Amino acid sequence: MVSFLAPQVSVVGSIHMDFFILMDHLPVPGETVLGKSFTMQPGGKGANQAVAAARLGAKTYMVGRVGGDIFAEEVLNNFRRNGVDVSYVRRDPETHTGVAFIFVDSRGENMIAVAPGADARVSTHDVDSAIDVISSSDVLMLQLEIPIETVVYAAKVAWEHNVKVVLNPAPARTLPEEIYGYIHVLTPNRIEAQMLSGVRIESREDIVKAAHVLMDKGVENVVITLGAEGALLVSEEGVYHIPAFKVRPVDTTGAGDAFNAALAVAIAEGRSLREAVRLANAAAAIKITRVGAQAGLPYRRDLEEFLKDVR
Ligand code: RIB
């Protein structure tokens, strides 16, 4: 049985409305594909991670922006329904709420285009206004769908207050060197690890080498996500491969968000990183069996049931 200590997690990040079309195959440039179904659901990596953390039992604060459009109220209500505190989500009437257009094929693979809108205006002032909740959190979660300057600033503020920073470097972007020293756990996938480290990744040894480059830059721990192969944890204690749970994928959208949120909540609860990565693998496995980024994010009871079953 997984115990529950009500940790506190803050997320500074993106908030979207996602437009999903399920289809047999993803289009190539110039091709029009007829979809099988359409749904509109709240999303965004930041928002998904906040909702997932709240569903997993953390007291969760979201810091970000929504626009002055019809989606703003919808995504705010969605946060409230999921128990996420939105006191630090600012309404920005000068732009639109971030939107993502997501195509998912019959194998569960996706293709995503984002128009950031209000995400692009999340500022260091927004971080300052939330400093009380960020500094009292156990973990701060960050991703890269808001301005990098804000990400670096939020990480610095958290680090200065001894709050552990979990940075999910997605979507892949280069990072200023300064940020690495603020990060407790960096969670790149293979492509992001290659881009951030400069190490060409073709083997398991290359992944470990890339992780060590990132640790030399100042990151305390690196967890490289490997999709169906699970994740590789590289820390001062050593290198550990934590295998994925085998499930039939329906939609991989948001799997990284489920993974990062479960990892952050487990760290906030004081679990070991190996245990945290195992829980993160379980949360991601549950997510990919369900359609929708947020709709598929597991609750605590789902995680506990799943782990009971696989045992
Ligand atoms: O990680 C999945 C998310 O990426 C989607 O919800 C979409 O909004 C994009 O930001």
Image (spheres, helix red, strand yellow):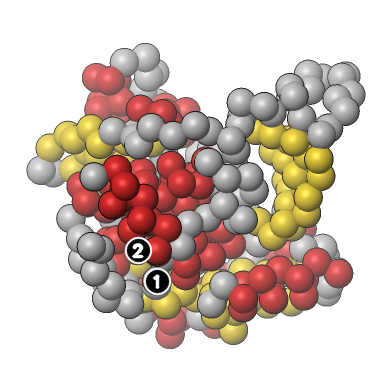
Question: Is disc 1 in contact with disc 2, using a CB cutoff of under 8 Å?
Answer: yes
Residue type, numbered disc 1: Gly
* SS under mark 1: loop
Q: Quadrant of the C terminus?
A: top left
Q: Quadrant of the N terminus?
A: bottom left
Q: Residue at x 69, y 38 (%)?
A: 112
Q: Quadrant of residue 271?
A: bottom left
Q: Can residue 42 be seen by looking at this rendering?
A: yes
Residue 209 as seen in the image, left or right of residue 101 = left
Residue 13 numbered tag: none
Residue 196 as seen in the image, left or right of residue 219 = right
Per the image, the residue denoted by label 1 is 57
Q: CA distance from mark 1 to mark 2?
A: 8 Å
Per the image, the residue denoted by label 2 is 265
Q: Earlier in the sequence, mark 1 or mark 2?
A: 1
Is the distance from the Cβ of mark 2 to the nearest ligand 1 atom less than 8 Å?
no
* SS under mark 2: helix
Q: Can residue 134 be seen by looking at this rendering?
A: no
- For the residue pair 254 and 126, the one nearer the viewer reads as 254
Q: Residue at x 21, y 66 (%)?
A: 270
- Residue 4 pos. (x, y %): 28, 72
- Residue 127 pos. (x, y %): 52, 74
Q: Quadrant of residue 210?
A: top left
Residue 297 as seen in the image, left or right of residue 6 = right
Q: Nearer the viewer, mark 1 or mark 2?
A: 1
Q: Is residue 260 above or below residue 122?
A: above
- Residue 179 pos. (x, y %): 39, 53
User: Label 1 crowding class (10 Å Cα cut-off): few <14, some 14-19, many 20+?
Assistant: many
Residue type, numbered disc 2: Val
- For the residue pair 45 and 286, the one nearer the viewer reads as 286
Q: Is residue 1 above or below residue 83?
A: above
